[in-house]
């Protein structure tokens, strides 16, 4: 069976906070021949762990890396790596993942009004700037 895992399935498997859903999530992940995890799922996963479960960036990065290390998981590895790098630098996983995917789609700079994100992206080797800087 090839499945796309939703955020809530990954959360139940990692948090183990609901016996019934945890069991179902673990059984699904163990039996699937392919587990597709789109980057938006990992963005949501990161946000939920940070905002609702008060997990640290290190804990969130470890959870994402553990999920992506599952042999049957397929995802956008370079975007995940960029997201984890920005997360561990104190930023948002989504900013790193989005900037990296944009670069692969042909963009040369990530346009954002979020100055902290732009600085962290620059540290991660991804070009980022305020839109006003880009238009002159």
Image (cartoon, helix red, strand yellow):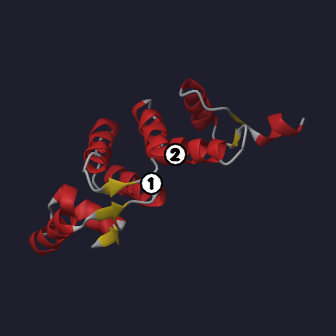
Q: Residue furthest top?
A: 123
Q: Name the residue under label 1.
A: 43
Decide which of 16, 65 is in the foreground and name it: 65
Label 1 to label 2: alpha-carbon separation: 8 Å
Give residue 22's mark. none
Q: Mark 2 points at which residue?
A: 97
Question: Disc 1 vs disc 2: which is toward the camera?
Answer: 2
* Quadrant location, the N terminus: bottom left
Q: Is 112 located above or below residue 1 in the figure? A: above
Is disc 2 placed on a helix, strand or loop? helix
Pinpoint residue 6: horizontal percent, then vertical percent.
36, 68
Describe residue 124's horizontal placement relative to residue 90 as left or right. right
Q: Which image quarter: residue 2?
A: bottom left
Asked whether the beta carbons under mark 1 and mark 2 sit within 8 Å of each other, the answer is yes
Q: Residue at the location (53% across, 41% down)?
A: 96
Q: Residue at the location (25% across, 45% down)?
A: 66
Q: Which image quarter: residue 15?
A: bottom left
Pinpoint residue 107: horizontal percent, then vertical percent.
72, 43
Residue 135 visible: yes
Describe residue 45's horizontal placement relative to residue 14 as left or right. right
Describe residue 27's horizontal placement relative to residue 112 as left or right. left
Decide which of 116, 106 is in the foreground and name it: 106
Q: Residue furthest right?
A: 136
Q: Is 58 located above or below residue 66 in the figure? A: above
Q: Residue at the location (65% across, 41% down)?
A: 103
* Quadrant location, the C terminus: top right
Q: How crowded is mark 2: few (under 14 residues within 10 Å), some or many (20 or more)?
A: many
Pinpoint residue 90: horizontal percent, then vertical percent.
44, 33
């Amino acid at each position: 069976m090839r499945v796309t895992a939703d955020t809530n399935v990954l959360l139940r498997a990692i948090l183990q906070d609901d016996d019934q859903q945890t069991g179902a999530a673990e059984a699904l992940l163990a039996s699937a021949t392919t587990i597709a995890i789109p980057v938006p799922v990992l963005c949501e996963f990161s946000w939920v762990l940070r905002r609702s479960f008060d997990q640290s960036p290190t804990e969130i990065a470890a959870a994402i890396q553990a999920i992506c290390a599952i042999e049957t998981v397929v995802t956008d590895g370079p975007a995940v790596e960029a997201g984890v790098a920005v997360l561990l630098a104190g930023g948002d996983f989504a900013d790193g993942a989005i900037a990296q995917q944009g670069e692969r789609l042909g963009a040369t700079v990530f346009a954002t009004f979020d100055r902290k994100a732009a600085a962290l992206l620059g540290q991660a080797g991804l070009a980022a700037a305020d839109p006003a800087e880009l238009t002159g």
